[in-house]
């Protein structure tokens, strides 16, 4: 028996490879499926099933492409109604993978089709559960993504999730291993641990939502408390996972068009494409194509694209580090952004060599900010998450989380310089680029963010 967690940090997402006696099951694959096929080939094994825990909202799964390339059927739990051929399993239905048995445990609540897969080893012993977004480490899945107006509320779903956890999962042995679909950093939960594997017994002892004496009313209150609105791209990803999508090879081929500066500029004007610059934030601040938006490839790239660009149909033109064009197009497609039109051949250097105008973002050090604050009142905007701001912040700093910045543009002054910071300098440059793209040109980035602010000795509360 082989179980491999294939974890993708950018999405905080875990896919799973399970092999026994030459047969393989894949659970919740990413959209680029070659790694799973190549992994099976190394084991001299064949992929027998592609299991999906639910219709994912935060990424586009690779189930359709993987099924097409291998012939393996796609399996969902009860209540799933995809637009393509799939096995819609019954609760407690069994699937054989080599000498192993995978049992369908219908665990609705995060969504109504949410399913946990229980793996029994060669001896028939309960070995592991693959919980999707039903149970995370330190948390449970948010119950607001599948609500339908007043018909099904998030409170209704939370109550259903309570029953699923207690009737299907918490009754399992404590030594069962928990393999969730996501870890810390995902927008699918609130309090997820940085660890990505644990035992069920440990989760029963430390996960707030699994308290033995917790009432359903308490569970509903605590699970729904403090939920931020889901990112706008979530329902669009659900639709793609449910109805179908283009295969990754086609998307890469369409998006990998080399464009010289003239063609790049013309296409941007004709299509209204977002110019997305994915280089390092310092390089972007020093010089970039006018009106471009920065979201660096080496940060939480795909989720930030989803949260801030939102519309998966939006045409995109890329400015990328040389050699990372295909990687960028692939990572955009993971969250459903398939409409990449091409990239600037040669990057910013080619643009500059064409003697076209470039733009920049002003920035200062935390030490300079401290000096300014000692002589006058300085407008400061903190774009970290609410929990980060609550933990410690500069007195009088205004808080606008990056994920909702597009809805709060009127809160930023237009007539005077103001200063923007995050935790380490990545998100604040994203914020400054968005503000500049929206016509607010007086944002100044604090290099190094809150970490540098504390090191400079600026007062925080």
Image (cartoon, helix red, strand yellow):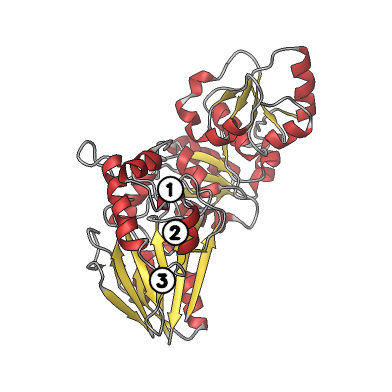
Residue that label 3 marks: 26
The location of residue 344, given as percent across then percent down, is 59, 47
Tag 1's secondary structure?
Answer: loop
Residue that label 2 marks: 181
Nearer the N terminus, badge 2 or badge 3?
A: 3
Residue at the spot 48% in from the left edge and 41% down from the top edge: 267
In terms of depth relative to the viewer, which is nearer, 39 or 14?
14
Q: Which mark is residue 398?
A: none
Classify mark 3: residues with Cα within 10 Å, few (<14), some (14-19) or many (20+): many
Indicate the quadrant where residue 86 lies: bottom left
- Is 89 on the left-hand or right-hand side of 420? left
Classify mark 2: residues with Cα within 10 Å, few (<14), some (14-19) or many (20+): many
Q: CA distance from mark 2 to mark 3?
A: 12 Å
For residue 329, above or below residue 360: below
The location of residue 253, given as percent across then percent down, is 47, 60
Check the image and name the residue furthest to the front: 213
Nearer the N terminus, badge 1 or badge 2?
A: 2
Q: In the rendered image, is residue 32 in sight? A: no
Residue at the spot 57% in from the left edge and 54% down from the top edge: 194
Q: CA distance from mark 3 to mark 1?
A: 21 Å
Nearer the N terminus, badge 3 or badge 1?
A: 3
- Is 326 on the left-hand or right-hand side of 219? right
For residue 457, above or below residue 115: above
- The residue mark sitting in front, 3 or 1, is 1
Classify mark 1: residues with Cα within 10 Å, few (<14), some (14-19) or many (20+): many
Q: Which mark is residue 188?
A: 1
Residue at the spot 59% in from the left edge and 46% down from the top edge: 260
């Amino acid at each position: 028996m082989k179980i491999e967690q294939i974890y993708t940090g950018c999405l905080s997402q875990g896919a799973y490879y399970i092999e026994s006696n030459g047969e393989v099951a894949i659970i919740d694959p990413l959209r680029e499926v070659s790694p799973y096929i190549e992994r099976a080939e190394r084991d001299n094994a064949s992929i027998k099933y592609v299991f999906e825990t639910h219709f994912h909202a935060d990424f586009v799964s690779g189930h359709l492409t993987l099924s097409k390339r291998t012939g393996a059927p796609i399996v969902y739990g009860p209540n799933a109604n995809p637009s393509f051929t799939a096995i819609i399993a019954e609760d407690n239905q069994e699937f054989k993978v080599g000498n192993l048995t995978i049992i369908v445990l219908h665990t609705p609540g995060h969504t109504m089709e949410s399913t946990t897969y229980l793996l029994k080893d060669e001896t028939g012993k309960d070995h592991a559960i693959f919980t999707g977004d039903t149970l995370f480490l330190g948390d449970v899945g948010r119950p607001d993504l599948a609500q339908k107006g007043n018909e099904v509320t998030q409170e209704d779903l939370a109550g259903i999730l309570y029953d699923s956890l207690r009737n299907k999962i918490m009754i399992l042995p404590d030594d069962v291993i928990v393999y969730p679909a996501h870890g810390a950093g995902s927008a699918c939960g609130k309090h997820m641990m940085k660890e990505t594997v644990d035992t069920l017994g440990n989760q029963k002892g430390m996960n707030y939502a699994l308290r033995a004496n917790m009432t359903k009313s308490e569970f509903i209150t605590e699970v729904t408390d403090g939920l931020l609105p889901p990112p706008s791209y979530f329902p669009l990803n659900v639709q793609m996972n449910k109805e179908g999508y283009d295969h990754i090879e086609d998307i890469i081929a369409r998006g990998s068009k080399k464009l010289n500066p003239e063609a790049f500029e013309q296409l941007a004007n004709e299509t209204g494409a977002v110019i997305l610059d994915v280089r390092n934030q310092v390089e972007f601040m020093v010089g970039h194509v006018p009106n471009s938006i920065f979201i660096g490839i080496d940060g939480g790239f795909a989720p930030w694209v989803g949260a801030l660009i939102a519309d998966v149909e939006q045409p995109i033109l890329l400015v990328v580090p040389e050699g990372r064009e295909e990687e960028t197009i692939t990572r955009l497609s993971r969250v459903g952004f398939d409409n990449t039109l091409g990239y600037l051949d040669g990057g910013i250097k080619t643009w500059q060599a064409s003697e076209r105008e470039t733009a920049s973002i002003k920035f200062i050090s935390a030490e300079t900010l401290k000096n300014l604050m000692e002589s006058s009142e300085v407008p400061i905007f903190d774009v970290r998450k609410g929990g980060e701001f609550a933990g410690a912040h500069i007195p009088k700093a205004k808080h606008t989380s990056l994920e909702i910045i597009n809805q709060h543009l009127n809160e930023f002054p237009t007539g005077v310089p103001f200063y923007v910071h995050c935790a380490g300098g990545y998100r604040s440059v994203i914020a400054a680029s968005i503000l500049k793209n929206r016509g607010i040109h007086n944002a100044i980035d604090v290099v190094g963010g809150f970490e540098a602010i504390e090191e400079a000795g600026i007062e925080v509360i």
